[in-house]
Image (spheres, coloured by chain):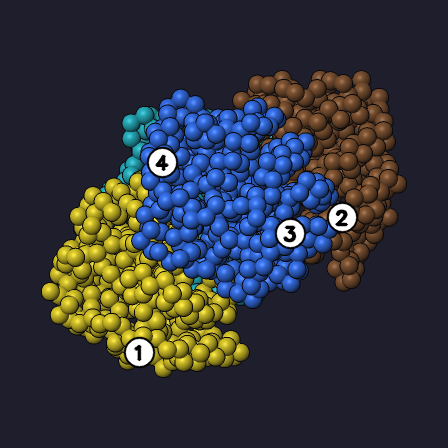
Chain colours: A brown, B blue, C yellow, D cyan
Amino acid sequence: MTSTDGLPAPLRGIVPPLVTPLSDPDTLDVDGLERLIEHLIAGGVAGLFILGTTGEAPNLSYRLRRELIERTCQQAALRVPVLVGVTDTSLVEAVELVRHAAASGAHGIVSASAYYFALGQAELFDYCQSLATRSPLPLFLYNMPALTKVRFELETVRRLMEIPNVAGIKDSSADMIHYHHLLALARQRPDWTVLMGPEELLGESVMLGGHGGVTGGANLAPQLYVALYEAAAVGNVEDVRRLHAQVLSLGRIYRIAGGGSSYLRGLKCALALAGICGDALAEPFQPLAGTERERVGQIVNEVMSWKVPAPTRLRSKTEATP
Amino acid sequence: MTSTDGLPAPLRGIVPPLVTPLSDPDTLDVDGLERLIEHLIAGGVAGLFILGTTGEAPNLSYRLRRELIERTCQQAALRVPVLVGVTDTSLVEAVELVRHAAASGAHGIVSASAYYFALGQAELFDYCQSLATRSPLPLFLYNMPALTKVRFELETVRRLMEIPNVAGIKDSSADMIHYHHLLALARQRPDWTVLMGPEELLGESVMLGGHGGVTGGANLAPQLYVALYEAAAVGNVEDVRRLHAQVLSLGRIYRIAGGGSSYLRGLKCALALAGICGDALAEPFQPLAGTERERVGQIVNEVMSWKVPAPTRLRSKTEATP
Amino acid sequence: MTSTDGLPAPLRGIVPPLVTPLSDPDTLDVDGLERLIEHLIAGGVAGLFILGTTGEAPNLSYRLRRELIERTCQQAALRVPVLVGVTDTSLVEAVELVRHAAASGAHGIVSASAYYFALGQAELFDYCQSLATRSPLPLFLYNMPALTKVRFELETVRRLMEIPNVAGIKDSSADMIHYHHLLALARQRPDWTVLMGPEELLGESVMLGGHGGVTGGANLAPQLYVALYEAAAVGNVEDVRRLHAQVLSLGRIYRIAGGGSSYLRGLKCALALAGICGDALAEPFQPLAGTERERVGQIVNEVMSWKVPAPTRLRSKTEATP
Amino acid sequence: MTSTDGLPAPLRGIVPPLVTPLSDPDTLDVDGLERLIEHLIAGGVAGLFILGTTGEAPNLSYRLRRELIERTCQQAALRVPVLVGVTDTSLVEAVELVRHAAASGAHGIVSASAYYFALGQAELFDYCQSLATRSPLPLFLYNMPALTKVRFELETVRRLMEIPNVAGIKDSSADMIHYHHLLALARQRPDWTVLMGPEELLGESVMLGGHGGVTGGANLAPQLYVALYEAAAVGNVEDVRRLHAQVLSLGRIYRIAGGGSSYLRGLKCALALAGICGDALAEPFQPLAGTERERVGQIVNEVMSWKVPAPTRLRSKTEATP
């Protein structure tokens, strides 16, 4: 394993996609963010990924995005690497945000592609190449076709792997067959990272060679996901089955409201009930209320009662910046 | 027909979705914009719609979007109303842009919805209501499900029609059945505007009661689209057939390159070949070149040779601001 | 207009896609079929199309399909041409059905393509060519991509137009832009027929050059659709608007139940309430009941009260077989 | 493990979806079928599944389907259970085929749903319930939403599990998250079988609790898939990784032609080159030829050179019918 400026290559473990704690739709919940980051680092995560889909990035104002980057880097204080999502429909704005991330001390960026128009593969390559060329930070590709309208096809990934600054891929497609092909491709570049998005697929993706996961539920229960990662990394199938079942069970909070924002609303509600941060969302999404909130509470109580092994080792500033 | 501050209600005629003339991917082609606006007003258009899909709005930097708004309003000089697309994933940024549009002298805004996440109908309503409430300008809904992932369902439109500041809808879904239902709904509010997006459907939409079209090809040949609109408005089926066939024929320029940006690249190439503005596009799109460019040139030459009736009356400042 | 064996070329007017009257899920309602056919011929239709989507063809047993073909041809008794849908996943079974149709006295067949696998354009061409070659009857293409998973692309249609036995196309895609391109293509073969599927698009399709419609609502109210066709054919825009609004209004019966079978269930319920045939459906579809049935009844009562002009001329055996 | 009439419950292991050997598009390759069945039984498979998607079932004539059922049951001679796909758009025809399968000595049937219309969940339930009620053989559900237009949602599966005659599900959706939820549901009925369709997902599905796979590549290399199944069943992650990589590598034969029939054409070409059966396909599909055929040949040669462990135990008539 090599490492550049505090970023292991490949990056292994759980890199949670942080929710963006808000006190109202356009105001950062500064205390909640602090608590969330400490909760995650104490839980053994291998990095922090802000401004992804789970972070509601596209729905936030640019001012708030910049503030979040600064505060996260300060709070993380080099104990774990910070990755910043910069997916934007405007490449000019994306580059601006990359520069801000670099100046704030982030370790890498994560980018899909302009997502209003449905890009072709050549345009997808151009977007990523253009961004990688102008980025002082390593770039991770973000495969999220349901929301960006385009999948990173294997040939496109292969071409992007030739750019040294492109460091890996986070696959949120939930297409496990595609993931296996991405893993096979990654063997051609040993420093290349392949991370799984959907937490329901974390166990098998790591058992079959993946490097870790960007799993939303880790905001709530980081130790559970770290334990699942670690069991999978050593091929302990029994533990994987048990912890995977717990992850599936936790996931009931994502389906309570129904609709495209159900995941975000359920997760933020759970974090509020667990005392980590408030449940305000950027417009036009609304917090859960009433019986839906109560059902999340019941599941959170269950989750809190589970015995989960402690992470085998806590990530420290020393480890992350050799 | 009533009118508020220079904006007829309903708004009738051709309101072209302006391309954004660029001299490089992040620089406005100021002279090109001036020529384009004069070309359109001379062609008899009923308004100017900037920063729509044809305007590559989501791919432009915010700085450039603001500059385009200012210069378009200045150049139009109240001769025709100016509508500004403000669709944004962040409602905060959308509101900022609305304020800039209002301060610059625009007459209305056009908005779909946050388009990264797939909104449900309740969220779509919330987004539009929130924007309408904060907008000093009338808001036109923009139905573009292929790119925004959500369709304005009839019940959502019906509820939004109850907000006085919501002035109409531009339907770019190419779903003619849905369009007919929207038209039927519009009869409940006589000042409400229903405009057609795809130019291939302009003739029939107006013959059956629609108010006009936001037709991309009008950038190149405004008189053709105005003539088609006028023939349809008076129910001259023979002329509609003939002009409609010309519109279809012109549309060959949109399919030369293939892929999602083919329309934009073909249209900008045609405008460059016609001497109106350059063919630079915002990243990651590239201008057409080589034989593709030559084929566009042949079609442009054909189009230029067509005899099209002059608009029955030129729109004037007087007419637009009673 | 030329004509072959009783089939005009092109075929103009309303060719309703007959529901299949059933007394139970696998038994033909023989009396209902007789009443339906007489109702349609009295209403001025230009032909009868059985075993289409509206006829629930794929859900019927082959025994019942053959019986329906025989009885329909007998009852029509050459007064109007009979077209038979033979779309099948197995080309062998399709050919069998074509032979049965020819032997029973049908005038043409209508075929999409094998619809279990998603065919490519080359395979779609092969399927249709193979069927046309073996068919003693003229073949109409059936463009129904939502159910067959493949669209007849223009180049495929162009190639199929070179086969003399391929007589036209019925476009049920509801994609009006594609329809316009099909119409433009059809000008290359003057005997080629282009029919519209969705009744909401009948008026405009005929005004802009189409030859007629295969409109489901004509089972209930054939005179309404014939009147709309005739107004459109002569370019009477005022009448088209009025009759088109009635067609839209009738269409409320299709959306009462919700779901993919809502159209079929609503239409059969209406026919039962109008005393034409029973409302049994092939499995797994169920007739409407309770308040849904009552709401259909209210709409049927409205429809029955409309004044619709009589067809300008009744189709007769003489006309259909010159 | 319980067993009824030779069918273990749950059914564990590899149950290959047999190609249908053809000597021409409507003629069974009787010798090829015999060789194929012996090849599979020698390879250690746990059952034979005929008339599935891989078997081109919907494209075959009914006469040929019946012949295939008879000959397969005869040749298998109770050494392994025979499952018969009976998915049909017409429930009447499906029931006919079930009866033929039962009379021929098959052990179970596999059914999706009527697939021309897009069924709702209630209709999907009705179809399966109706078929299960009339079937003398246990019914396995077939989840194939890409081709049937409807997914078996969890609540629908839960309701169908209450019917004793519904024995399990084959999930060909390639949606691994859904598969995990199906597995969790299956714990409520210990005799219920959950099989994986896509072979790229076989290893992980069995490691995480699934019972086996219906893997197309097993037609060519049954021992490879049986070995992968057995490694996964005992949690041997190292062997799973290695054999899984071989399965992915073999899968190159499916993508050589491109398009929806590429899988079928590649697989049949490989079987022909391996001397098992001919490569004729039912219309409208065509065998591979030229350089495409050569590329398949190279991959087949590679596959043949792999060392694969022998199945730990050969299935015998004794084992299958205790």
Please give the residue where the numbered disc 3 appears in the rendered image.
B5
Disc number lying in front (3 or 2): 3
Q: Amino acid at mark 4?
A: Val
- Report the Cα–Cα distance between label 4 and label 3: 36 Å
Are discs 1 and 3 less than 8 Å apart at CB?
no
Observer able to see residue D64: no
Disc number lying in front (1 or 2): 2
* Element at label 1: helix
Q: Residues within 10 Å of mark 3 (few under 14, many from 20)?
A: few
Query: Quick check: C301 left or right of C186?
Result: right
* Element at label 2: loop
Disc number lying in front (4 or 3): 3
Please give the residue where the numbered disc 4 appears in the rendered image.
B303
Q: What residue is drawn where x is 81% and y is 30%?
A: A70
Q: Residues within 10 Å of mark 1 (few under 14, many from 20)?
A: many
Q: What residue is drawn where x is 68% and y is 31%?
A: B63
Please give the residue where the numbered disc 2 appears in the rendered image.
A281
Disc number lying in front (1 or 3): 3
| Protein chain holding label 3 | B
